[in-house]
């Protein structure tokens, strides 16, 4: 079938929507055109660069009439950096876009209509919210990858990161420039900052050798809040930032962070939510949706380091947390001890394998929480949840598409979606977190 556009065509477009990847969406005779940098309401001139059967891709040449929702970005690196997509859109509109992304996925992919989807819960201040910064190092440039590239945008600081990250970047840059450090030695910088300002710095290297290491330590120690410095060795040429070998260079083995009143140990490889303010909102909503009491047992599947489990333990008689990552389970056990919580049991393994074993032992769940990775739940796990027949399931998701797919499955098996609450965990980006209440019919 002939498409209405060809490569090289220059055309005027009205941007009417935005994709889940942050691309503007326009139409030519019903044919979809994706334009990077276009936002709903923009009237633009664009050049067609690719043509597929069902859509085309175009390069933005000029904005003739900008959307009324546009604003001047507070980030001077925004045009080049691939980290954020929405700096030029006012925050109120960002929130509307994300709510609509969740709604569209649930209706289009999940096939679920007339679902109660609440407006997204946003932040009072949508900047400087991240407690973990991860920066690429290439020669003397330290920052983030450019859009669609592995070239590094050299930055002085990042306005969605904690301010301490900016100081760490400067200290490492000064060290790299002063001692002319070979570009193949340091590959990444990771900065983890707790609520009280305690900071862990991790220098990721390709091998054990780190020239003038004492000078680097001295530079970092002088930064207020830095109480732990590690060298992490990652010899593998993969996108994974951290390797498995850590060498403590200075200070404490771990830092302690908080979500609400709960304390969590943070080590170099620990997983921890990057937006503690919104994480508290998310987990309180999970507790509200569960409506758990002190006579009930709750399963927390894909439990990670036990963050949700700790919240639920306040109300439940017993909580079982299941996680496949060994290090996460060990962290979870330590976190339970740190908070003097004794009604949680953490088990290492695949949830779809562990849960049937628990059922055979006569251990079942009145309520279930699932918080899977972006790929969503394993279908075997969903089957296992159905067989277990809990009264309620609370699903926490970072991917609206896989969430919608799994909700469709659960709905077809007798679990009605009662309510969906999006939460803005990642302002200025297209990412959106959601929490869903499902109830057995």
Image: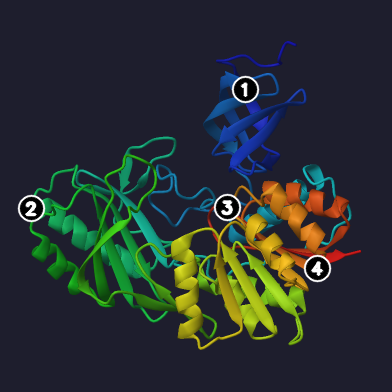
Question: Which of the two residues, 58 or 439, is positioned nearer the viewer here?
Answer: 439
State if disc 4 and disc 1 touch (CB < 8 Å): no
- Residue 49 image position (x, y, % from top left): 54, 21
User: Which mark is on residue 11?
Assistant: 1
Secondary structure beneath label 3: loop
Question: Which of the two residues, 172 or 360, is positioned nearer the viewer here?
Answer: 360
Q: Give left or right: position of 410 versus 353.
A: right
Q: Residue at position x 85%, y 50% from top?
A: 112
| Earlier-in-chain disc, 3 versus 1 | 1
Real-space CA distance between mark 3 and mark 1, rounded to the nearest whole angstrom: 24 Å
Determine whether 191 is above or below 287 in the image: above
Q: Which residue is mark 2?
A: 179
Quarter of the image where one finds residue 302: bottom right
10 Å neighbourhood of mark 1: few (<14), some, or many (≥20)?
some
Real-space CA distance between mark 2 and mark 4, rounded to the nearest whole angstrom: 61 Å
User: Which mark is on residue 390?
Assistant: 4
Foreground mark, 3 or 1, reads 3
């Amino acid at each position: 079938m002939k498409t209405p556009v060809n490569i090289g065509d220059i055309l005027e477009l009205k941007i009417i929507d935005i994709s889940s990847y942050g691309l503007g969406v326009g139409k030519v005779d019903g044919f979809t055109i994706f334009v990077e940098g276009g936002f709903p309401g923009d009237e633009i001139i664009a050049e067609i660069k690719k043509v597929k059967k069902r859509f085309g891709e175009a390069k933005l040449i000029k904005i003739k009439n900008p959307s009324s929702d546009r604003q001047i970005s507070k980030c001077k690196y925004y045009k080049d950096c691939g980290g954020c997509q929405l700096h030029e859109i006012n925050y109120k509109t960002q929130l509307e876009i994300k709510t609509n992304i969740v709604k569209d996925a649930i209706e289009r992919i999940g096939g679920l209509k007339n679902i109660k989807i609440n407006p997204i819960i946003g932040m009072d201040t949508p900047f400087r919210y991240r407690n973990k910064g991860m920066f690429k190092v290439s020669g003397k440039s330290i920052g983030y990858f450019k859009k669609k590239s592995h070239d590094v945008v050299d930055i002085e600081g990042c306005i969605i990161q904690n301010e301490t990250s900016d100081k760490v970047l400067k200290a490492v840059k000064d060290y790299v420039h002063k001692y002319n450090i070979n570009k193949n030695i340091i590959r990444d910088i990771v900065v983890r900052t707790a609520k009280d300002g305690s900071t862990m710095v991790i220098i990721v290297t390709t091998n054990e050798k780190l020239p003038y290491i004492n000078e680097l330590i001295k530079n970092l120690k002088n930064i207020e809040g830095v109480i732990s410095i590690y060298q992490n060795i990652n010899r593998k040429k993969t996108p994974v930032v951290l390797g498995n070998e850590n060498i403590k260079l200075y200070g404490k083995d771990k830092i302690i962070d908080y979500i609400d009143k709960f304390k969590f140990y943070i080590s170099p490889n620990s997983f921890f939510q990057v937006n503690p303010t919104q994480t508290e909102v998310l987990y309180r909503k999970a507790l509200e949706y569960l409506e758990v009491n002190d006579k009930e047992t709750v399963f927390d599947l894909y439990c990670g380091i036990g963050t949700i489990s700790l919240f639920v333990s306040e109300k439940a008689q017993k909580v079982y947390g299941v996680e496949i990552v060994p290090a996460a389970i060990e962290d979870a056990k330590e976190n339970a001890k740190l908070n003097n919580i004794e009604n949680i049991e953490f088990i290492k393994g695949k949830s779809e394998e562990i849960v049937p074993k628990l059922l055979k032992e006569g251990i079942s769940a009145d309520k279930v929480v699932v918080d899977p990775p972006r790929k969503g739940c394993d279908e075997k796990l969903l089957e296992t949840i159905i067989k277990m027949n809990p009264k309620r399931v609370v699903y926490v998701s970072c991917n609206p598409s896989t969430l919608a797919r799994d909700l469709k499955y659960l709905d077809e098996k007798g679990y009605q979606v009662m309510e969906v609450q999006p939460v803005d965990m990642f302002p200025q980006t297209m990412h959106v977190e959601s929490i869903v209440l499902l109830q057995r019919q």
